[in-house]
Structures are given as C-alpha cells and as structure tokens.
Image (cartoon, rainbow, N blue to C red):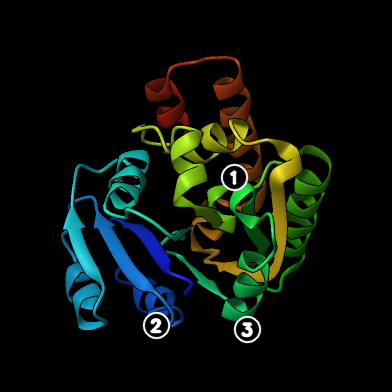
Amino acid sequence: MIKLNIVIPTLNSEKTLFNTISRVVDKAEVYVIDGGSSDSTKDIATSLNALFTVTKPSRGLQLSTGANLIYDGWILFIHSDTFLSEGWYDEVIKFIQKSDSKKKAGYFKFKFDDNGLFAKLIEAFVGLRCRFFSLPYGDQCLLIHKSLYTMVGGFKSISLMEDVDLISRLDKKNLYNIPVFAITSSSRYKKRGYLYNIIKNFLCLIMFKLGFSINLIKLIYES
C-alpha cells in the first residue's frame, strides 16, 4: 500500500491555501505547518481536514517540522501558493511504482497562473535551468521517500534557500521531472515586476552559493 503525505508550510496564506489543499486532500494525509498566521489560514486548513501545527516563521523549519511528523512513506512538499494540475496523482503513482523510486526525488514542471509573455519566458527559463543544471526550486514541489530524505539530512531550519540547500545534497542523476504542472501564484511577481524578481532571485542564489549569511540574503529577498 502506498502511503502519501503532503507537507505545506504557511504564513498568512488564506488567499491561496484552499485551492492548494482541496486539490490533494482526498489522496493523501495533509500536514499544514504554520509560521504564526494572523488571518484565516488555520480555519481553512482545519475545515479541509488537514493536520495543523504551529511553529516559528521559517520555511526551512516549517518543512523539517512537517517531515519529522512523518515516520514512513512518501512525502510531497508543496508551497501554499501552488496547486497541482489535473491528473497529478496518477503521475505521482507512476513515479512511486518505479523499481528504483526510493532512491530518487521527483519534482514537477513550473507554471504560473498567468499566460502573459513574461510569465511564459520565466517558465521556459526554469525548464532550461532544471534540464541543464538539475536545479528545481521549492515552488516545483518535491516528492521524496522518508528514507532518502533522512539519509541526505532533510531540510535545514533556515528561513530561505532551504530548497536549494537540500537539492544540492541529492545526486543529480536521481532527480526526476514528473509530468505534472505545479501552478504557482504570480501575485508576488506582478507586485514588483517580473524582471525585478528574476534579478533579485538570481542574486540571492549567487550569494547563497558564495556563502553569504542567510540573514543578509533574506534582507534582499524581502526587499
């Protein structure tokens, strides 16, 4: 029997959370790990029968807290502003049923909820980044068996870049692109502009790779 668990980190996520959970809750046990929301995040999560836990506001800490609640089986990490395309479960099961799946980690295809030109260009760039550099980000989700997650050390309790950090500890040949769209809200990109966010995210990635402090990177990321 396949046991699928879903971990969703939240912080004031009321605008997107219902769509995120409602797409997956009938197929898995859903754990919502909240960073201290002041909106209706908790009400939405519990109304959809998700297990709700509160911790400090740090995405790495929230993800690791959720993973620590799961003792066995598969874990799918999803951001709270992302929902999965139709047919996601069938594709996930196909991946899990592969003979060597427990040695691999799966991620999804990146897509915005926006059909504009800039959104399409970023989607194409993400596809190239994953193809040539094997570097999916957290908004593409991560499907991994608890045994492999534990073996590589799991998520570090850092406030950002936790996805890049974990992916860097996985063997590139064991990363698998599952043909499912992880459809992410474009509201953050539209607020300051797509180009601004592209440059900022790239700068943060370079700073992280060069060993700059997370606190400094966070100042730039949140600007």
Nearer mark to the viewer, of 3 and 2: 3
Tell me residue 181's x, y (percent): 65, 70
Alpha carbon separation for disc pair 1 and 3: 30 Å
Which disc, if any, is residue 79?
none
Q: Which mark is residue 22?
A: 2
At x 25%, y 73%, the residue is 45
Q: Residue at x 29, y 47 (%)?
A: 68
Residue pointed to by mark 1? 197
Q: Secondary structure at mark 2?
A: helix
The answer to whether any part of residue 212 appears in the image is yes
Can you give x and y, in whole percent of width and height, for residue 188 in the image?
49, 56
**Mark 3 highlights which residue?**
87
How far apart, in angstroms, are the residues tagged by discs 2 and 1? 29 Å
Tag 3: residue type?
Answer: Gly
Mark 1 secondary-structure assignment: helix
Residue at the image point whose x is 38% and y is 56% from the top: 72
Location of residue 197 (image quadrant): top right
Query: In the rendered view, does 110 fall on the left or right side of 50?
Result: right
Whether pointer 1 and pointer 3 mark residues with C-beta atoms closer than 8 Å, the reply is: no
